[in-house]
Image (tube, rainbow, N blue to C red):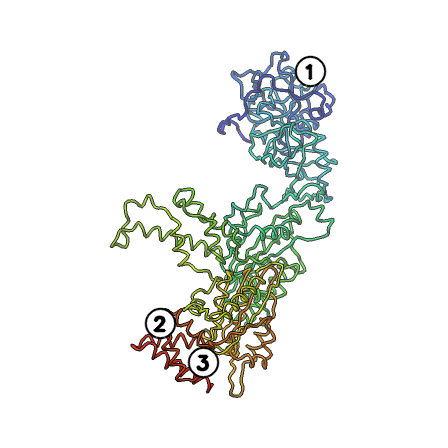
Amino acid sequence: MFNRNNLPSMPNPFGSRPEGSPRPAARDGYTQPPPTPPRQGGYDTRMGGVPDAPPAYGSNRDRQASQRTPAGRPAAGGRTGGSGRVLQLRPAKSPNDSYTFGNLAAVSPMDIPPSRDGSDVYILLNGAYVLSARPFDGFPAGSISLSDPQRTWAQIALTDMVEVQVYDPFSQGGQSYLGSIDAEVGFAGKKRTDIPYDQDELAQHFIKNFENQIFAPGQQILMDHKSIALRLTIRTVQLVDLNMDKLGSSAAPTLSDPSVRGILTRHTPMNFFKDARTGINLKASNRRPAANSIIQPNFKFEDMGIGGLDTEFSAIFRRAFASRIFPPGLIEKLGIQHVRGILLYGPPGTGKTLIARQIGKMLNAREPKIINGPEVLNKYVGQSEENIRKLFADAEKEYKEKGDESGLHIIIFDELDAVCKQRGSGAGGGTGVGDSVVNQLLSKLDGVDQLNNILLIGMTNRMDMIDEALLRAGRLEVHMEISLPDEHGRAQILKIHTTKMRDNNVMDHDVDLGELAHLTKNFSGAEIAGLVKSASSFAFSRHIKVGTMAGIQDDVVNMKVNRQDFLSALEEVKPLFGVSEEELSKCVRGGIMHFSALIENILDEGRLYVDQVRKPDSTPLLSVLLHGPRGSGKTALAAKMAMDSGFPFIKLISPEDMIGFSEMQKVQQLSKVFMDAYKSPLNVVVIDNIELLVDWVPIGPRFSNSVLAALKVLLGKQPPKGRRLIIFATTTERSILQQLDLADRFDAEIAVPNVNTHQELSHILRQSGAFSDQDIARSMNEIQEITGSAEVGVGIKKILTGIETAKQDDDLPGRFARVMSQAIAARGFA
């Protein structure tokens, strides 16, 4: 037993009741006392019979009634929350079972007289524990009966003296009633049953026995239910005011402080938890939520430090966690099982692993097990499969003991594609280990002995590599794409990563996070974090002493990260799935020469196609073929239309980047570019020199059938829902594409002409800025004389090259005329 004198004193958290505060009515719906057992004339020395019960309380007493002189020794001074004299009483055994199972303390009427209305008296023990006392005729004066559970809870031994005084339940303010109770229930003795207890019936029986008593977290109560002794331990309580709309309001905080206490009413909701040590079975309630509810009620996305994933989280909660929140009885009626697996997939840096690291914060479950895919593999035979079994060992053990009352076990599997490749693909070095690991994981997730208390969260950026059997329903059945954040999501991520800058006044006022969110198109969360670090580095550089590498200026304390730092960082940090600006800028290095009205018409037509794809209710996929003579500017026009679109993802596919590639490597590269394009909402893919891409040569003729087949498929493959794609392709050999049955795969065609007249040629010379009007006139005359024709028929590329060549000669117009005459003459031999 505990000795109170050996423990540190506990301050009483309650103050005296304000004058005029209401007392509980004698016979209203909340303060009706339980039936009073018949008084007995003698004192029963029996022990009360059952271990571990908590204190209780009855209805309010008239503190102003005259009291008889107690036989117990009065103590000087009072305790907070108590009123009247402090008595020194000696613990004794409960007089009978009605006191033990009624959670009552027996006292002598000489020490504490009965109340005027016959209800029980609230008493405060040692300034910290509240019970309901009932005067018992014939009980020895100077004593108080406490059952074993009551003495254990109050830490009182039979040899101790107990300070007792009448307690005012309203001394702690208006919220003196219990809005809800969470209690753990188990068997108290050897007599047990395998029949599950109905939670609603238990709650009714508890309220019937203990209505109007006071309960606090940590308190233990004995209750006789159908001749079987049950032990209940109060875990948490909610305190409410009776003026509130309803008890159990979610606005009231859930408290586990032992010093918090309240009055039980007939309307107080109760939630029961199973005490696994005694093997009691609880029937699932149809009205109360799961006792092992895993979602914290005060959870917020901002607390996880993850932005831009609100839609994804909502879908994950709906699919994986909703069934675990609702009452288990309702889930049993539906006949469904909980989701046991979620697969998060998407581009690198979008927050898949961050979700895994933060997932424990939103759940009341135990700490998740986190394992990286390669860690599973082991060089010893059978050890890889054993590592998989160890992940599920704790969940299996608890499920055998507790069944559906088992807590949730979360297993987070990063880089899942490393060990769960397609079976039969040779993964595992030809030893078959990869296949065995997949088989072991499949059997644990959805085998003969199914577990309903696990949640496996797998993550990968190569979903196509994972075995299909692992992705079916019952295993990793929820597939959630964690895609690149939109502008609103990027603003959230920027806000998260600059929180400390703003809180510590290190970020300048000219930084607009909305502007940065607009400028960071197709940035992933990791790339935005890199952008913030890059901007900070520019701020650091301003405070390094000139001529030194590590010398810091004295004004470093005033350092601020400003808008220009972020703009400089944008030039330095480029998104992986962004615009290929460098490659596209090479294609339009000299700009677009509007030498003819046809050029403006081509650009207008390109803008029309782009707007067609941009509108959400229009075409999600559109392919456009630009064809024309070699050097006519097809690639430059396609690149110009792509850059003017403003789409976040623009990629150029050029044969120049595939020199030395085998057919299979070309197919894989094409597939990768299009798969990347499907990860962004708006995308442009420019395919340059499509005839070179398929390895077409006129001798033979010869072409790559694999690459041709891949192009045919990709040109017609619809992007995923919510994704839109426009394809610009260029070719010099349109007739060849018709023979290869590729030209008909395009939705639209645009013809790009050569420079055909001297007027168009003069316009180009004037736009170049290298020729005066006299030089232009002389060049045109000389070309006319040499060729004898007013027709040019040369591509813009050769003309621009000829201008650059003529600039190197002192005779600028004469040299240009000779170069162009040769080009016009060579056209006839082409």
- Residue tagged by mark 1? 116
Number of other residues with Cα within 10 Å of mark 3, as a class: few under 14, some 14 to 19, many 20 or more: some
User: Is residue 662 positioned above or below 43 on the image?
Assistant: below
Work out how far the residue at label 2 is from the one at label 3, CA to CA, in angstroms: 20 Å
Query: Given this view, does label 2 or label 3 mark the residue nearer the observer?
Result: 3
Give coordinates of residue 782: x percent, y percent.
37, 81
- Residue tagged by mark 3? 790
Q: Quadrant of residue 570?
A: bottom left
Secondary-structure class at tag 2: loop
Number of other residues with Cα within 10 Å of mark 2, as a class: few under 14, some 14 to 19, many 20 or more: some
Question: Does any portion of residue 139 appear in the rendered image?
Answer: yes
Query: Given this view, does label 1 or label 2 mark the residue nearer the observer?
Result: 2
**Viewer-closest of 141 and 532:** 532
Give coordinates of residue 826: x percent, y percent.
43, 85
Question: Which numbered circle lies on residue 771?
Answer: 2
Quadrant assignment for the N terminus: top right
Q: Amino acid at mark 2?
A: Phe
Badge 3 or badge 1: first in the primary sequence: 1
Badge 2 or badge 3: first in the primary sequence: 2
Give coordinates of residue 271: x percent, y percent.
66, 38
Question: Does any portion of residue 384 appear in the rendered image?
Answer: no
| Label pair 2/3, CB-CB below 8 angstroms | no
Query: Given this view, does label 3 or label 1 mark the residue nearer the observer?
Result: 3
Badge 1 or badge 2: first in the primary sequence: 1
